[in-house]
Image: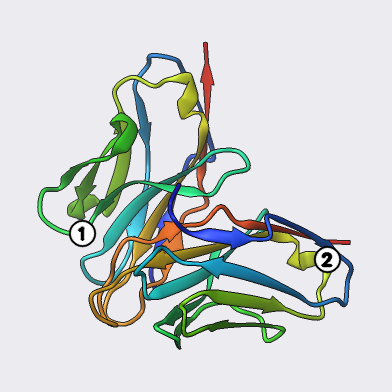
Amino acid sequence: AQSVTQPDIHITVSEGASLELRCNYSYGATPYLFWYVQSPGQGLQLLLKYFSGDTLVQGIKGFEAEFKRSQSSFNLRKPSVHWSDAAEYFCAVGAISGNEKLTFGTGTRLTIIP
Amino acid sequence: DSGVTQTPKHLITATGQRVTLRCSPRSGDLSVYWYQQSLDQGLQFLIQYYNGEERAKGNILERFSAQQFPDLHSELNLSSLELGDSALYFCASSAPTSATSTDTQYFGPGTRLTVL
């Protein structure tokens, strides 16, 4: 069964500092990987996704993520955070071949301090 | 705006009652997914429909059911409600090129259900 681990429940970063959110997955084949962001009271917005090809993927809002098969990781990064980046971030893994559900991690809450 | 709409935005009801949540997918999307987000369980997949047929089932209780109509909108029915059913219910849609491929899921804003 597929699973996702986000080891950091809460991260606090100063505005303008760099950010890395960790995500580790467990899946028996090549996974489809996603990062979603949820602002308070809002739905889930897709930041970026990895299906195949280049292991460094670019997303919206200046985010990027790198797929590392050897480490079963898909960490999200941003070189300089903005106060508007404060939100909850979810990593998810998707299956293929007829069962397309997403399995989500528990989320990482990001707080930005001035 | 993802293009996925959900109604109502908020729903407050009592234990034992039945409610219906509605979802309209993005134009052209054939697949609809339902997820439940609660404090203790996190985000969990409930059920998927593809072009009107049930495609995959997750941790959906027997008291819950869903369907997808010919116009591709979907409804999630929750009955005999319990306090623990209070949660945010998300609908997502995607446009797989076939029933066995994966595509990006776009999420609606959710329906917040409060059971008193």
**What residue lies at 34% left-to-right and 69% top-to-bottom?**
B28
Mark 2 burial class by Cα count in 10 Å: few <14, some 14-19, many 20+: few
Identify the image quadrant of residue B26. Answer: bottom left
**Residue wearing tag 1:** A51
**What residue lies at 58% left-to-right and 61% top-to-bottom?**
B6
Residue B41 appears in the picture as rendered: no
Please name the colour scheme applied to the rendered image: rainbow
Image quarter where the N terminus of chain A lies is: bottom left
- SS for tag 2? helix
Mark 1 burial class by Cα count in 10 Å: few <14, some 14-19, many 20+: some
Q: Which of B58 and A3 is in front in this view?
A: B58
Q: Position of residue B32 (x, y in %)?
A: 45, 72
Q: Where is residue B97 in the image (x, y as percent from the top left)?
A: 23, 75
Judging from the image, mark 1 belongs to the subunit labelled A
What amino acid type should be assigned to the residue bearing mark 2?
Leu
What amino acid type should be assigned to the residue bearing mark 1?
Phe
Q: Nearer the viewer, residue B31 or B73?
A: B73
Q: Nearer the viewer, residue B91 or A73?
A: B91
Q: Which residue lies furthest to the top in this view?
A: A114
Q: Is residue A92 left or right of residue A43?
A: left
Judging from the image, mark 2 belongs to the subunit labelled B
Q: Is residue B78 left or right of residue B107?
A: right
**Circle on res. B83:** 2
Q: Where is residue B30 in the image (x, y as percent from the top left)?
A: 37, 75
Q: Is residue B76 left or right of residue B82?
A: left
Separation (CA) of disc 2 from disc 1: 39 Å
- Is residue A51 placed above or below B85 in the rendered structure? above
- Is residue A87 placed above or below B8 in the rendered structure? above
Question: Are the residues under marks 2 and 1 on the same chain?
Answer: no
- SS for tag 1? loop
**Circle on res. B3:** none
Q: Position of residue B54 (x, y in %)?
A: 47, 87
